[in-house]
Amino acid sequence: MTLQFNVEGGDFARAGYASSQIKKILKEIGVDPDVIKHVVVALYEAEVNIVAHAYHGVITADIEKEGIRIVLDDAGPGIPDIPRAMERGYSTASPEVREMGFGAGMGLPNMKDNTDSLDIESVVGKGTKVTMYNKFE
Amino acid sequence: MTVKDIVEKFGLKVYSGASGLGREVKGGYCSDLLSDVMGFAHEGSVLVTLQAHKNVMAIASLKDLAAIVLVKGIKPEEETADASEAEGIPVLGTSEQCFEFSGKLYDYIEGK
Ligand SMILES: Nc1ncnc2c1ncn2[C@@H]1O[C@H](COP(=O)(O)OP(=O)(O)O)[C@@H](O)[C@H]1O
Ligand SMILES: [Mg+2]
């Protein structure tokens, strides 16, 4: 099963929509609740990163027998230094975004901690592609 | 323990989501950083926070939190209250600040 969602930069009101849809479907097909919890944390953070840092993006989720692969492909400024961005506490979020309680620099570390694999490719000035995988067992 | 027990014990305001007053309370979490709540709050927790905008409800729903308590008399934004109604997750309020309220809630939940 493949699902797709569009995400617009700056649209905080809708942030979390894809995460809640995917949560619902994983529940329906009887995936282990602990696995669902991890997927939801990682996906929400990745979704918010498009909203907070990029212009727009597409989320593609492939639900297979063994697990779920989610690709988040955005057009945006890209990430110049990925290892730096992965550090807990590192954030370039604007003051407005921080005031809302985002921009703690915990998103990418949360994604790392809640996935079985996380891969980030980024081209500065073009965009970022995040691929994450969670096994179902 | 249900959300209703907490409302009655502390005389909390029920701003929205009254249909969820029967939700079971398993613990509490105190934070204004949404990624912190997302990463570390547990299902069934009461979230004590200053954040009154809609994203806090998105998180409450994704994490299956029991309720949100806004401290210092802060009221939920309209969209937050709407989402709380739709999800059946109560948004509550106290005039106390985070430290005072969390301390009392902790003792109550831990049965002290
Ligand atoms: N999709 C993205 N496009 C551009 N930059 C990003 C993206 N995702 C993350 N970043 C960069 O990595 C930093 C750290 O991300 P994260 O750990 O999620 O923290 P936060 O979002 O709270 O700033 C961000 O501040 C931003 O500079
Ligand atoms: Mg982030």
Image: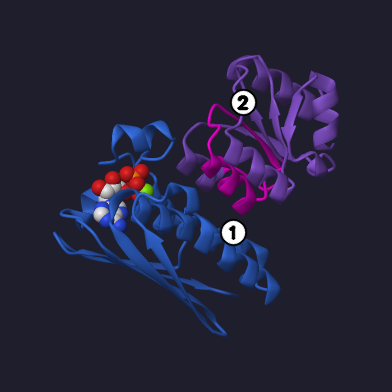
Chain colours: A blue, B purple
The residue at 61%/31% (across/down) is B76
Find residue B26 and report its image quarter.
top right
In the rendering, at what x and y percent does residue A67 appear? 53, 78
The residue at 79%/24% (across/down) is B108
Task: Return the chain for callout 2.
Answer: B
Instruction: Return the residue at label 2.
Output: B75
The region drawn magenta spans B41-66
Nearer to us in this view, A60 or A5:
A5
Task: Return the chain for callout 1.
Answer: A
Viewer can see residue B50: yes
Mark sitting on residue B35: none
Viewer can see residue A87: no
Q: Is mark 1 on a helix, strand or loop?
A: helix
Question: Would residue A122 be found to the left or right of residue A63 on screen?
Answer: left
**Number of marks:** 2
Find residue B66 and report its image quarter.
top right
**Magenta includes B63?**
yes
The residue at 72%/44% (across/down) is B85
Figure check: B68 above or below B85: above
Q: What amino acid is at disc 1?
A: Lys
Q: Distance between the residues labelled 1 and 2?
A: 29 Å
**Magenta includes A15?**
no
Q: What amino acid is at disc 2?
A: Lys
Question: Would residue B21 be found to the left or right of residue A90 on screen?
Answer: right
Instruction: Return the residue at label 1.
Output: A37
Q: Is mark 2 on a helix, strand or loop?
A: loop
The residue at 40%/31% (across/down) is A99
Find residue B11 and report its image quarter.
top right
Nearer to us in this view, A89 or B86:
B86
